[in-house]
Structures are given as C-alpha cells and as structure tokens.
Amino acid sequence: MEENELLAFRRQKLQQLLERKVNPFGGRFDVSGTIGEVRQNFLEGSPVRTAGRITALRNMGKSQFMDVSDLSGRLQIYVNLKELPAEQAEIFQLLDIGDFIGVEGESFITKTGEPTIRVERFQILSKTLRPLPDKWHGISDVEIRNRQRYLDLIANPASRDVFLTRIRIVREIRRFLHDRGFLEVETPMMQPIAGGAAAQPFKTHHNALNIDLFLRIAPELYLKRLLVGGFTKVFELNRNFRNEGISRRHNPEFTMLEVYWAFADFELMANLVEEMISTLAESVLGSLQVAHKDSEGNIKRTIDLSRPWKRARYEDLIRQVDDMWFERSRDQKLMHCRNLGVEVHPEMEEFEITQRVFEKLVEEQTIDPLFVTHLPKELVPLAKQNAENAAVVDVYELIINGQEISPGYSELNDPTVQRRRLLDQVGEEIQKLDEDFLLALEHGMPPAGGIGVGIDRLVMMLTGADSIRDVILFPHLKPKSQE
C-alpha cells in the first residue's frame, strides 16, 4: 500500500472502534511488571498483566501471535480468537503493529522454548494512526533519526542502547561523587553577566526587573562563590548554552559536569577524573577497552582506559612536533606551519599559532587518555600561575579519542590577579567584568581544584558515537522550512 492508503486504512479501523464504543486511547492499566521484568521473573503457569507496543504480528487464522515491546524488552503473546468473546475477537482484529495494548493471561512456554502469555483479556491503550519504520532496516536517514528521535528509538536498538548507556553514565557520576563526599548544587541558568568561559552567550530580557540576562555559558563563577561561602566539595551537572557554531562535536545546548574541591589542586583533580572515568567504563560497559566501530560493525579503533594514564607538559608535546618551535620567531612559526600542514592566519597571536599546532598535531592524533599539563597562561585566565614558570598555569587538559574531554585547574584565588586576568580577557568591554564575583574573592576563597567534564563528549567516547547529535536526544537543527 501507498502511505496515504495505509493512513486511510488505519483511520477506518479507528472509526470502527469508536462505532463499537471502544476507547481507542485508553487510560490506566495496572501491570505486574514491565516486559523486561516479566521475562526476567517468568514462571510458567502464573497470571501475568503487562503492557507495551505491538512490534510484530503473526496471523495464523484463529491463532494469533504478537510481540509486545517496551524499553525493557520484548515478549510474545498468544491469542486464540475462539477463546475470546465474539466482540473481543472482532476488536482484536482491528489492531495494528504500533498499537499499545495491555494484556492479561497465563504464562506458558511454547514448543520452541519461547516465554509467552496466553491472552485471556486485553485492552487497547493507544491506536497508532501511522505505520512504524521497518524494524529490519531501521532508519538509515540521519536527518529523520535526529528530527524524529521517537522513530529512531523505536526502530534502531543500537541508538536506544546509546541513550540508555548515557542515563547509566550520569547516574554513576552522581553516585561516584556522592560516595566521595561531594554535594550536588544548583546555580543560576540566567545570569546578569555571562562568565566562566570565553564564548558567545544567548541573550534574553527580564521584564519585571527590566534587565538583560544571559543563558549561562558556564557555572564556574557561581560554584566558586560557594567555596567562598564554606562549601568544600561541590558539583553541578548542568546545562550550558553557547551561541556558536554547530558541528560533529558542538551543540549550542550541552551538558557539563563541574566539580570543585577546596584545598586540592589540578593534580588531585586529574586523579579524581581518571578514577571516575575508568570506574564508569568498568561499571557501565564492563571493560576498560572501549571499541569504536564503523557502520559495518568492524572495529576501527580501541581506546585503552587502563590506569595509570599518561601525563605530559604542553611544551614537551609541542617539541615532539618540532624541537625548535619555541626558539622560532612569530614569523618563522607562521611559515613553518605551512610545512606542518597547519592552517593559521597572519593576525593570530603567537600563543594562538602554537595552540593550532597543538590541536592539529597533538590533540587530534591522541587516542588513549593523555593529561596535557602546564598550558600557557593566555589560554586559561581562571587558573593559578605556576610557581616555577610564570608563563604557564597549573592545569591539565584531558584528551581522549582526539578531543578534549575534561579541563582541570588549580583555581586562581588571588582577587588582584583575577581582576587583572579578567580585564585582559574583556578588553575594552569593561561592563562584562563580574564585579560581584571579584567581591566574593576579596572575602577569601580557599585554594581549590576544579574540573569540567563535557558529558556529551564523554558519552561519545564511551559509546563510540561519531557525532554529538547521536548522544543528545533532541539536538538543535535548522527548521525544515529554512532548508
């Protein structure tokens, strides 16, 4: 049938149900467990009540076999139309793949060993007016998968597994931090000054206060206020918003974990994040070897999360690319980038040129975990300056699978130095200086370590997803009307 014929056919069935005084969009149906729980606790000869979506139908005349599914699994049901009242038998034949039903009956095991429910009573819970995607082929169109995630979740078990894994990862992160005495807090998502990172914010206006507000680009400055207030171990799993480009690794709305630990430093924070991610891999995936596969299911790379993870200074990694790099003048560096195949612009600052070399020839080439430490101070204005080398700051940048997963700092707590750093960052836009944060620092913030972890990128790394859109349930897309 053509799609329009299918839609018309299903609407005819809907009308027939209404004519029989059957509610095609029923209500409550008490169950003895989810489908997964029923299968797990299956006991032949027991009464069972469960509900789900019809995902397969095998019509054998008076004998009907169906698969009923939910997020937890699939279960076969059997109906003998002769055993049902005539009116119920007629209603049963108005069901389609995709409909939701509730069933009640006795459990038994077929000759082929399949756990099954012999249906004695059933109830239509929702009539589906559109056909579902072919379960054998799923949805290969990436655009449809991202725009109509509900169809992707129905048709693609692999996609469903990614999001279930994400849920477990977030749950385990909370457990891991709670077990170590960290307190989960909430800070404002609308802020009068967009601080804590260098990014373009989304802007809105509050009518009652008659002030402009910004969706946060980072929670950092508010979490540090809590350190000032006496909290010694805090974390927030938060949504951040940055009005910037969309790519395979960037979405304008994304999830971050930020953790702050009073009296710690960047090295302790590196230990913490190393333990956390390796613990996640073992508890959620069951292995420290994370295989990334291609579309054919072949392994293209394996990430080894076995501890200890490698640590190296930023300068040493650049010298591995070019041992004379830091002895070259700015112009020589620009010219040498051509030989290295690194694209740069003449107006770039010298540290930006070096950073481009790092991104292309170190970061993108790194698969197994690597803590890059002691970055140039220009790259990290909120971190503490190194006591032995004033040109660098005490930070790490954790790289796995060619991208940054987590930065970690020995946090700057000197209000005078912090003001100077922020002034350098905002330049002439002095109104962007967060005076309230600087005031808090003047009341005394303890030395502390802090980390950020991009949850979306972490999930990509642990699940082998190629795009950030594959790990965000509803990624931002251009409206179809603008395409």
Image (cartoon, rainbow, N blue to C red):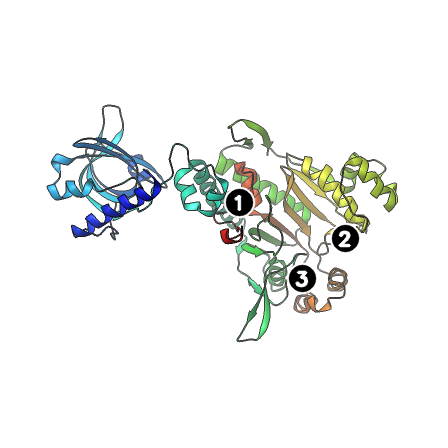
x, y percent for residue 310 = 68, 36
Cα–Cα gap, marks 2 and 1: 31 Å
Cα–Cα gap, marks 3 and 2: 22 Å
* Residue 472 against residue 187 in the figure, above or below: above
- Which comes sooner in the sequence, label 3 or label 1? 3
Residue holding disc 1: 469
Asked whether 465 or 260 is in front, the reply is 465
Q: Measuring 60% from the left and 46% from the top, which residue is drawn there?
A: 247
Disc 2 residue type (three-letter) = Glu
Nearer to us of marks 3 and 1 is 1
Q: Quadrant of the N terminus?
A: top left
User: Which mark, by number, is residue 49?
Assistant: none
Residue holding disc 2: 378
Q: Find numbered disc 2 in the image and state the secondary structure of the residue it sits on.
A: helix
Cβ–Cβ under 8 Å for marks 3 and 2: no
User: Which mark, by number, is residue 445?
Assistant: 3
x, y percent for residue 459 = 54, 42
